[in-house]
Amino acid sequence: MDSDDYYMESGEEDLYSDGADDYNDDDDDDGYDKDETGFLVDDDDDSSMISSPRSHINYVVLKEEDIRRQQESDIAQVSIILSLSKVEASVLLLHYHWNVGKVNDEWFADDKRVRTSAGLEGGSVVVPCSEGGKVACGICFDYFCPIDIVPITCGHAFCSTCWNGYISTAINDGPGCLMQKCPEPSCPVAVGRDMVEKLVSSEARDKYDRYFLRSYVEENKKTKWCPAPGCEHAIEFSATGIGRSYDVSCLCSHSFCWNCTEDAHRPVDCDTVSQWIRKNSVEAENTKWILDNSKACPKCKRPIEKNNGCMHMTCTPPCRHEFCWLCLGAWSEHGKDTGGYYTCNRYSKAKAQGLHDEAEMKREFAKHSLEKYTHYYERWAGNQTSRKKAIGDLEKFLSKDIVKLSDKQCIPETELGFITDAWLQIIECRRVLKWTYAYGYYLLESEQEKLSFFEYMQGEAESGLERLHKCVEMESELFQNAEHLSGQDFKCFRTKLTNLTSVTKTHFETLVKALENDLSNVGFASGVEVVTLAL
């Protein structure tokens, strides 16, 4: 399980939905229950952390047994409708990438063509027998009794030993074994599952079954595997409803974007996320830093960084070339007449003539670009770190602190769900805020009005989040240990934290909607309603 996404609930509605709820309301009447992760969840529809335009869940998490059940159901359906064996139906579905509708359409349009293209039939072959009634294997050319020969639909016959080696080798080579054809060169007839089950070892058979099962997900445009390490669940996505969010949550608690399989990143689009991830590549940023902060030695061309000192530079061995940092000319041509060690008259004169303007502009632009990137990256990474810490704090609260607080305040654990809600809100808002910095990095500086509107909206949301985070982090701990605080004080804390959670949710809903609309309401910035609390 990815601990970074531990807080996501198994089988729950995603945090952006505000409609159908999957919570179990058969147990407690107080509005709270526990999900598979042990987290308290609210049975009300308003439990979503940030609302979404989508009114229902448009994806289903599939366990291995669910995938196998759907796969066998599709095979049975095609088998019944087209009056084929299940082996033949499997071959057809593999050929058409498990698209049942396309199989039916193509079959009823021209079943003969489909049979040939899928490898269900080929030219009829009569296998000659020797005088002793034995049959020659088409691979090893030894003669065998007919009972030891295994024929295929096309009529080509091979001994069981050769079949075993042929199929086992294909299985060991990878998923391509699912489309294996007859060993006879140029014969298009497919090798079906029945041949695999009958001829190879149990180990090879199990491997083939895994490839067969995985093909149902990997060849299907509507399903994808959860990218979390070690997770074997798949997500079946239905592009229905209003809105374009692809964020999904697997039963393993990993939350990701179904479209690009990166971590969930609403409200930022997949292209921006892809650019930002490439930008954060260590190798790419190291290369950029070298280009932005160094100059090449005029002789050996190796990059050199100057962090202090005079303009007299000496390259590292074996080069040892001495040159001026400003004009890059040989130091032997410099001295008192050129300005000494700390200036360069040659450079100043050349710059006055405009010879170094372009290089200086490039260097200044590179410096500004790096400073801008550093600004956004530090805040992106900072919110990611804060989110991970919040997840750890929530785990600690649910495993230890909630019991301690319940005993201290003489309140049932089920009535402390408002603290859990606050932590869940913080975790989700940290995720959203993190990606808004990636969004902000790619905003054009020339669009000053849009940039100002974005920074205003982001600032309001971040300010509310910091107040909420500080409140739940410090005051909930205070009530666990303090002796002098009364029940009335705790009620005031509940009201304060609940209000802060609500206000923070409102701020982030406004921010998310603005970014999803690409800040199209920038002209109406003055009319944005801002909710604040005097707390």
Image (cartoon, rainbow, N blue to C red):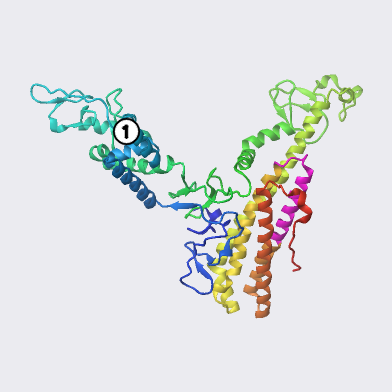
Viewed as shown, does residue 167 lie left or right of 12? left
> Does residue 505 appear in this view?
yes
- In which quadrant is the C terminus drawn? bottom right
Which amino acid type corresponds to the residue marked 1 in the rendered image? Asp
Q: Which residues are magenta?
A: 442-466
Give me the residue at 71% from left, 47% from top: 520
Question: Residue 376 sits in which quadrant?
Answer: top right
Give me the residue at 79% from left, 54% from top: 526
Report which residue position mark 1 lands on: 111
Residue 422 position, x and y percent, is 62, 64
Near-viewer residue (74 or 103): 103
| Residue at the far front in the pictured view | 109
Classify 10 Å Cα crowding around label 1: few (below 14), some (14-19), many (20 and above). some
Viewed as shown, does residue 68 lie left or right of 202? right
Question: Residue 277 sits in which quadrant?
Answer: top right
Q: Main secondary structure of the magenta part?
A: helix
Residue 283 position, x and y percent, is 62, 35
Near-viewer residue (283 or 492): 492
Q: Is residue 38 above or below residue 514?
A: below
- Residue 457 colored in magenta in the image: yes
Residue 245 position, x and y percent, is 58, 49
- Residue 310 colored in magenta in the image: no
- Badge 1 marks a residue whose secondary structure is helix
> Does residue 172 appear in this view?
no
